Image: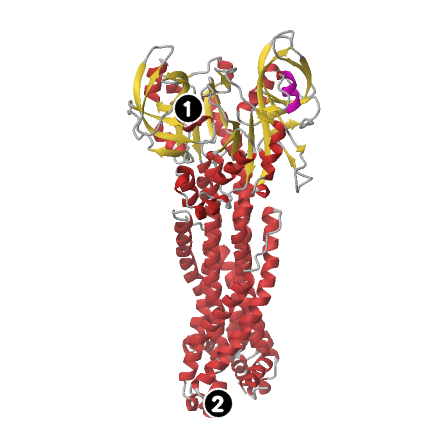
Amino acid sequence: MGGDKAARMPVVRMFVLILFKSLKVRRNRVAITLFSIMIGAAIITALASVYFDISAKMSRELRAYGANFFIGPSASSGSRLAESRTIDEAVKMVPADKLIGASSYIFGVVRLDLGNAVLAGVDFAGLRKLATYWQVEGKWIGVAFDEDSCMVGKTLAKNMELGVGDSVNVISNDSGFQRRLAVKGIVETGQVEDEQIFVTLSLAAEILGLEEKVHHAMLSIVTEGMDIDELAARLERRFPGLDAKPIRKVSYSDGRILEKIRGLMAIVAIVILTVTTLCVMTTLIAIVSERTREIGLMKAIGADDRGVVLQFLSETLIMGVAGVTAGLAGGFLLAQVLGQAVFGSYISFRPIVIPMTLIPSVGAALLAAAMPVRMAVRVVPAQVLKEE
Amino acid sequence: MFVLMLRESFVRGRRRKALATLTIVLAASLITALMNISIDVGDKMARELKSYGANINVVPKSETISLEIGGVDYNPLQGQVFIEEKALPGIKQIFWHNNIVGYAPFLRVTAEMAGAREKRVPLLGTRFDRHTPVEGDDEFRTGVRAINPYWQVKGDWPDDDGAGALAGAALAREMNLKEGDQISLRMGGKAGPAEILAITGILSTGGTEESAVVAPLPVAQKLAGLAGKVQWVNVSALTVPEDKLSRKARYSADSLSSAEYDRWYCTAYVSSITHQIEEAIPNVTARPIWQVAASEGAVVSRIQLLMIVVTLAAFVASGLGISSLMVTTIMERAKEIALMKALGAANWEVYLLFLGESAVVGVIGGLLGSAAGAGLSQIIGFSVFGASVSFSPIVIPVNVVISVMIALAGSLMPSRLITRLYPAEVLHGRR
């Protein structure tokens, strides 16, 4: 009985010895195994990372549709105008990292050389980010204090016979204010903007005689990861005279589109994950299958089935973990390449990706090793060694 | 001799070959499915993006400038021009008629609402979901429900020929209107004709429609005495993103050569569709609504790029996977090759054997994979878009060629390694 313990020590040492010898001697095969596990793990990591980031990324892309949030005076306040200071404060309540762009608007009817038109005062810096879809011939007004330029809607420009570089007299019927403005750009949107003339907020306030007032503000907010209705309710609670609401046309569609894109990405990721895992499995099966003779030899010199299976699985486990670790690093790099190529920004790292890659990859590797080994241990050693 | 060896190799190494083929089938089906999805995703997403509403606005040719601020018109009666309603089916008969998803005509007038207190309310006449048979499509239905899916109605949509109407949410709140209420609208003072309308639902749009009564078009036409007239038409069309040619056509149409003009006319750019609508209907101006048209292009091309990059990544990964499998299946045959060489086979014969085997495996795998991939892409199509993905036949030959190339490339390196071995060493068991 005393010899049992003494006998077990060499068994363990033998096991470790065989394990490392096998990894060392079969360097070629080990490299291929590691390589294929690594490739599989890398692609799974990359796609999972992209999947988890896709909503945030596409949500920003969808901001190309312009304003999705409206802040204006509430109907109950009776006025169509709001204090510009209050509106600015309300806009500041939107988290800065979620706000793509915002602009206040003020409107009034003015007389131009050849007829009347609606004049809109806007914050051009905010508007440029808000209305990326504006088709501008000529140039945008760049600075907020440019009080000698205007932008003119396409239809209005046609009717008033204006082109880029021309100048136009703007006269207010109410205040009598008059100024000659240079046409810096012609705007085409296909909507009401085509019939309006745009100047900076401060100039519009001066022309229309409406200092410190605006009609409303339009905002473009990244809705991913925040409750936009809750934001609207919070703003209305904080500023009772204001009406804050998501613009349904845009915010409703955003949600639908994001859902579709996320669904597409999810199913593509699942398909790739499954197929890649199967590919890794077939490679491992091929590698382990060719060792049938080795198994026969081990059995012939006295190894039991359990020992053989244990040794092969340990080998695979070591290679699997090593391969997946390398794959995780490689996959994260790959995700950055994807992110840069498609969105021009980095994909953030999420810890959930690690188990998502580790479990299927190592699981598939073990399964792939177990199947041929089980088949091999069932055969009679003499047969295998005689190559039958 | 070569054919015999090839056949024997497949018969004897059945398991090995099956494994190689299976891997190629898997990889090829993945690539097929992704390629298919990439090709079709632009079209599918463009359809989804239709939920942002119409992308073309058709208005009468007119010299007047509207002076409208926030739904209030400061210049309501001046020089109104209209579009004839009966000309509208022409929109569905242009060159790109299959790309026209739908259209909805509008007529906006101001009416007096009789009741406890007189109130002037905007009345918007439109079509909701009207059966409009056109040439080649007898089942064509169109109206705001098709082109503005973001319109949300609490209650029921009114019938297009009935006397029901929707009350805008803001108006309903102000006037205390609810489903089932009756309202009476008239125009032109007490003497004008009156219409009794039943409110069938409350409409939320987030736009100016919320403060209006939205009624079937004939009701608004009758009240305003404008039978058969509409003010503007919103059209929803599937378009391809803008590019250099369409921009050139827009800003300097005269500088297009006739070949360029033909190419522009026969491409579903939003600008060529608006041009064709202007040709089809007399005296109108069709303008792209750039908020929808331009943004759609940006989003669709982004998603297309995403799919292409993902396909490429999967392609590279499965290529490497197949190569590593090829390396193992060839390396384990060192003894056999050594024997071949010892019997006098030249290196090129060994190459030929392996490359021939790989080519056969590649063709079989590629074909089976294409079939499996076609099925896979339909599964993806149905689960994500609820519609079948159109299968592009070009994918099959491309895929078979790719599979063969990968298999060949994968076996080239190990073949070289194996032909370099010395037969004596291998056969003796030293390697």
Res A67 quadrant in image: top left
Q: Nearer the viewer, residue A196 or A209?
A: A196
Q: Classify mark 2: residues with Cα within 10 Å, few (<14), some (14-19) or many (20+).
A: some
* Chain that bears disc 1: A
Does the magenta segment cover residue B218?
Answer: yes
The quadrant in which the N terminus of chain A is found is bottom right
| A379 is higher (above) or lower (below) than A95 | below
Which residue type carries mark 2?
Answer: Leu
> Are discs 2 and 1 both within one chain?
no
Give x and y (percent) for residue A6.
48, 78
Above or below: residue B94 compared with residue B410: above
Please name the residue that numbered disc 2 is placed on.
B339
Callout 1: SS: helix
Q: At numbered mark 2, what does the secondary structure look like: helix, strand or loop? A: helix
Identify which amino acid the numbered label 1 is placed on.
Answer: Asn
Q: On the rendered image, what quadrant is the C terminus of chain A found in? A: bottom right
- Which stretch appears magenta? B217-223
Whether residue B41 can be seen here: yes
Pick the residue in front: A172 or B387: A172
